[in-house]
């Protein structure tokens, strides 16, 4: 018997369930954009090379163009539409706005989703390719401009807004860090320090 | 893209039963390479067997003090694991040097071993390619080959294996474990990839229908002082044009043990055993490192546009071993 080439699936996106039939060839990216009208996630190269389609899968960033929709069933998908808290923007979105972390804006949803994950990955102590000593005994590396550039390298910006993107990620990371500490005065100092660290 | 069936396996036996029953079936891990190749028509599976939910996502210490790494462990989890970073730092560095954060979250260890070459003739179905379409020819030999092989290639194929991870695994004598419908098996990484010869389309020694279940790394104290260095055409998020995994144990200025493997120079991660032999028991000097690199690279057969790789690899051997020797002396 020939195998079916389509399936009825249920996707969990931004906390909501969506049931839909999909041809197995459908990527998560196309399911979001073409089937569910969630067009915030952008299609750039469609080959995993540009990062425009970045979403979070079970909290981790992934390129939705290489993720088959049928294989995403049962996993929690967060798209750019699910990042803000209602009308209140996420600190990463605020930082991109405040620091002009974009020009045309096409890559921005992917940049923001990726930046969210970069901040979490760094907070979890993950090293990167530019971390001098990857030993866990060396402690977590500071989130310098070099570290941010390496960690964000999967997101291309053809407008070349990288300088502002690096600053936005640094500021958002500092804001996230200080909001997790009891020091109420920490936010601005941490953000200033982050700005200084990446403007050198 | 060709239409295909999709089944999600919940245990290893079920997965190998599906893979064994259908020669057109392929295992789906992260899909970062397979799905891309399906889009371009290079891969045309009749069925995908999704193995991501198999219980193969753990990293454990073995009784002898090595590590066992499950096939569906993601690149990210491998590189973030404390024991990998502490005991096999070059492996963590190699994984971190590959792809992007997004892709490392998706990609799996088993898939990394089975990823296909990025040779532009292989990935373009309008071109001849002996690896994709046996007997059609290799345009790279006289065409675009500045990123291609200098070691172990043949007139039939000069493509390189693109893995960074595999280079460190080659240096550390990894063993690949697999399961088939007829039972389990294992292959040392040195025997996992087949020589190119006249059959570049036959890439691994895995039996038909086999599923990689994981890797073991034998204990290797020398690996604690190891490093991966990758040279590429931009600073990040690009495949290597040359890379090296090196580990060095120097005692009183003498090389007690050394491990060396090269990436992006051959159809497989290239263990540099000639260089290791030349160095072991000798002085840990830049001169000796250079001579050892020359011994390994004596077999190099560069093409008109990739001769730079011979110099590049020699420089990498000298630079990285010199760093490791200096750090050992501190």
Image (spheres, coloured by chain):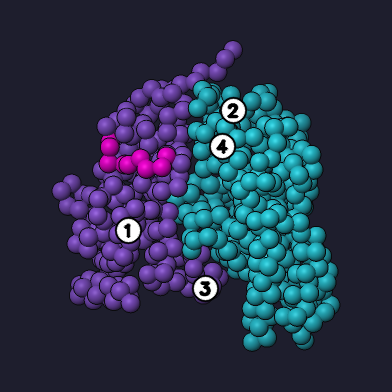
Chain colours: A purple, B cyan
In three-dimensional space, the C-alpha distance between marks 2 and 1, rounded to whole angstroms, equals 39 Å
Q: Chain of mark 3?
A: A
In three-dimensional space, the C-alpha distance between marks 4 and 1, rounded to whole angstroms, equals 29 Å
Near-viewer residue (A159 or B308): B308
With respect to residue A161, does B255 lie above or below?
A: below
- Near mark 2 (Cα within 10 A), the count class, few <14, some 14-19 or many ≥20, is many
Disc number for residue B45: 2
Q: Sequence-wise, which precedes: disc 1 or disc 3?
A: 3
In three-dimensional space, the C-alpha distance between marks 1 and 3, rounded to whole angstroms, equals 27 Å
For the point 61% across and 48% down, the residue is B144
Asked whether the beta carbons under mark 4 and mark 1 sit within 8 Å of each other, the answer is no
Disc number for residue A132: 3
Extreme residue toward the top, this view: A1
Asked whether the beta carbons under mark 2 and mark 1 sit within 8 Å of each other, the answer is no
- The residue indicated by pointer 1 is A160
Asked whether the beta carbons under mark 1 and mark 3 sit within 8 Å of each other, the answer is no
Callout 2 secondary element: loop
- Near mark 4 (Cα within 10 A), the count class, few <14, some 14-19 or many ≥20, is some
The image shows residue B116 at horizontal and vertical percentages of 62, 43
The image shows residue A82 at horizontal and vertical percentages of 27, 44
Which residues make up the magenta segment? A38-46
Q: Where on the picture, by quarter, is residue B210?
A: top right
């Amino acid at each position: 018997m020939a195998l079916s080439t389509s399936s009825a699936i249920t996707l969990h996106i931004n906390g909501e369930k969506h049931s839909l039939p999909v041809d197995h060839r459908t990527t998560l990216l196309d399911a979001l954009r073409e089937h569910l009208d969630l067009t915030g996630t952008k299609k750039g190269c469609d080959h995993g090379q540009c990062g425009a389609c970045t979403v979070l899968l079970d909290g981790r960033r992934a390129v939705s163009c290489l993720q088959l929709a049928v294989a995403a069933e049962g996993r929690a998908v967060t798209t750019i539409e699910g990042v803000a808290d209602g009308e209140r923007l996420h600190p990463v979105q605020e930082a991109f706005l405040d620091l002009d972390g974009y020009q045309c804006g096409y890559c921005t949803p992917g940049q923001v989703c990726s930046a969210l994950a970069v901040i979490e990955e760094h907070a979890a102590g993950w090293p990167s390719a530019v971390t001098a000593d990857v030993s866990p005994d060396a402690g977590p590396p500071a989130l310098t401009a070099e570290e941010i550039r390496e960690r964000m390298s999967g997101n291309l910006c053809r407008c070349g807004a990288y300088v502002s993107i690096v600053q936005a990620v640094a500021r958002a990371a500092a804001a996230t860090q200080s909001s997790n500490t009891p020091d109420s005065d920490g936010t601005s100092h941490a953000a200033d320090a982050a700005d200084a660290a990446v403007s050198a | 893209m060709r239409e295909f069936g999709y089944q999600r396996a919940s245990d290893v036996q079920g997965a190998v039963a599906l893979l064994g029953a259908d020669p057109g079936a392929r295992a789906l891990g992260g899909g970062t390479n397979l799905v891309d190749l399906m889009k371009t028509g290079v891969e045309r599976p009749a069925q995908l067997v999704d193995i991501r939910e198999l219980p193969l996502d753990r990293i454990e210490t073995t009784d002898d003090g090595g590590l066992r790494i499950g096939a569906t462990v993601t690149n990210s989890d491998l590189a973030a694991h404390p024991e990998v970073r502490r005991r096999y730092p070059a492996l963590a560095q190699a994984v971190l040097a590959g792809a992007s954060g997004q892709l490392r979250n998706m990609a799996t260890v088993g898939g990394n071993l089975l990823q296909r070459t990025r040779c532009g003739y292989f990935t373009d179905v309008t071109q001849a390619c002996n690896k994709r379409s046996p007997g059609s020819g290799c345009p790279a030999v006289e065409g675009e080959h500045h990123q291609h092989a200098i070691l172990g290639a043949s007139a039939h194929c000069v493509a390189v294996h693109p893995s960074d991870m595999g280079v460190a695994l080659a240096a550390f004598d990894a063993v690949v474990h697999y399961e088939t419908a007829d039972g389990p098996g294992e292959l040392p990484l040195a025997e996992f990839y087949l020589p190119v010869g006249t059959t570049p389309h036959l890439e691994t020694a895995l039996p038909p229908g086999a599923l990689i279940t994981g890797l073991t790394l034998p204990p290797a104290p020398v690996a604690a002082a190891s490093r991966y260095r990758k040279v590429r055409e931009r600073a990040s998020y690009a495949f290597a044009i040359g890379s090296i995994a090196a580990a060095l144990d120097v005692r009183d200025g003498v090389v007690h043990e050394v491990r060396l493997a090269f990436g992006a120079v051959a159809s497989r991660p290239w263990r540099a055993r000639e260089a290791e032999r030349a160095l072991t028991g000798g002085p840990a000097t830049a001169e000796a490192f250079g001579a050892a690199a020359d011994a390994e690279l004596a077999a190099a057969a560069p093409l008109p546009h990739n001769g730079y790789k011979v110099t590049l690899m020699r420089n990498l051997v000298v630079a990285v071993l010199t760093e490791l020797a200096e750090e050992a002396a501190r």
